[in-house]
């Protein structure tokens, strides 16, 4: 018998990504990326976070709110396989699922008390767009959540950094100092769709209020322009 369950958004994340282009394909790939989690007003009770300071990492349960579809497909095309091979949806982390729910592990960088937003969590390594709704937060427990002997299927090895990133000094100066390493890490991961490999094409995405435009020739990525968004 089909069942439906309603869920409440408990918080939203505020990250440097206004769109999904450029967002790392998995959490933890770019540790320099920092984001904040702001709870919805009805969940700003500090007692709900009592004891959280003792954990170094968190699980975020969130919604692919930009990928909601009425229908679902039993197979998808994982970017890891170049976008040309179909795999079962339950063997992937594709956002196009029967229920658009995601799970990410992030590093807890700090817990801050604010006057206007209550208790705010600072996290590192998140792979979420700005404003993404969060359904739940759970502590990462090493003895239960870490399985070094586990098999990783077609995604056994981390993608890692694949590109040499060239940012001309005059363009790098336009990036706030505390965002430079994060931007370099995002670009080194190759944010392009895996099926696109045109050295003449210039790509662009929003990052921390800036528009970053770049091209890729072989294994070298060169930033062409950095300007204010809008």
Image: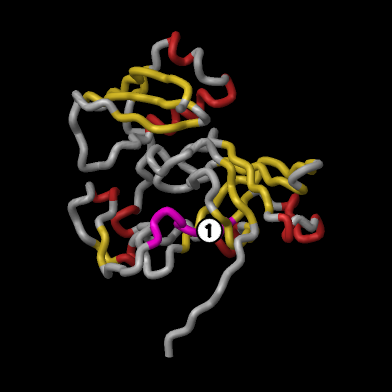
Across and down, in percent, residue 87 comes to: 25, 62
Residue 83 position, x and y percent, is: 22, 50
> Residue lying farthest front?
230
In this rendering, the answer to whether 185 lies above or below 109 is above
Residue 61 magenta: yes
Coloring scheme of the render?
secondary structure
Look at the picture and state if 53 lies above or below 69: above
Q: From the viewer's perspective, is 189 left or right of 126? A: left
Q: Disc 1 marks which residue? A: 62
Disc 1 packing (10 Å; few <14; some 14–19; many ≥20): many
The residue shown at (81%, 41%) is 115
Expressed as whole percent of the image width and height from the top left, the position of residue 104 reads 51, 54
Instruction: Give the magenta part as a residue range.
Output: 59-68
Residue at x 68%, y 53% (from the top left corner): 39
Query: Residue at horizontal 53%, vertical 42%?
Result: 125
In the image, residue 208 lies at what x, y percent? Answer: 52, 30
Q: Horizontal placement of 92 versus 129: left or right?
A: left
| Residue situated in front as seen by the camera: 59 or 62 | 62
Quadrant occupied by the N terminus: bottom left
Numbered circles on residues, count:
1
Q: Quadrant of residue 159?
A: top left
- Residue that protrudes farthest toward the bottom in the picture: 1
Q: Quadrant of the C terminus?
A: top left
**Helix, strand, or loop for circle 1?**
strand
What residue is rendered at 51% in x and 26% in y? 181
Closest to the observer: 226 or 181? Answer: 226
Residue 93 left/right relative to 44: left
Compare residues 106 and 213 and report the one nearer the observer: 213
């Amino acid at each position: 018998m089909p069942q439906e369950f309603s869920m409440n958004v408990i918080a939203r994340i505020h990250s440097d990504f206004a769109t999904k282009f450029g967002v790392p394909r998995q959490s933890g790939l770019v540790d320099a990326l920092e984001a904040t989690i702001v709870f919805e007003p009805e969940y700003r009770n500090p007692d709900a976070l009592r004891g959280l300071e003792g954990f170094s990492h968190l699980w975020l349960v969130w919604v692919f709110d930009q990928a909601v579809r009425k229908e679902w497909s039993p197979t998808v095309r994982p970017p890891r396989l170049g976008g040309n091979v179909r795999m079962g949806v339950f063997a992937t982390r594709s956002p196009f699922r029967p229920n658009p729910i995601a799970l990410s592990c992030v590093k807890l960088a700090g817990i801050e008390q604010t006057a206007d937003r209550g208790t705010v969590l600072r996290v590192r390594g998140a792979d979420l767009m700005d404003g993404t709704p969060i359904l739940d937060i759970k502590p990462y427990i090493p003895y239960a959540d870490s399985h070094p002997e586990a098999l990783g299927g077609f995604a056994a090895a981390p993608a890692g950094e694949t590109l040499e990133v060239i940012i001309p000094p005059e363009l790098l100066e336009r990036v706030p100092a505390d965002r430079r390493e994060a931007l370099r890490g995002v670009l080194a991961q190759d944010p392009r769709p895996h099926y696109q490999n045109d050295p003449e094409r210039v790509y662009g995405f929003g990052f921390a209020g800036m528009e970053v435009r770049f091209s890729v020739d072989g294994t070298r990525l060169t930033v062409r322009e950095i300007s204010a968004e809008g």
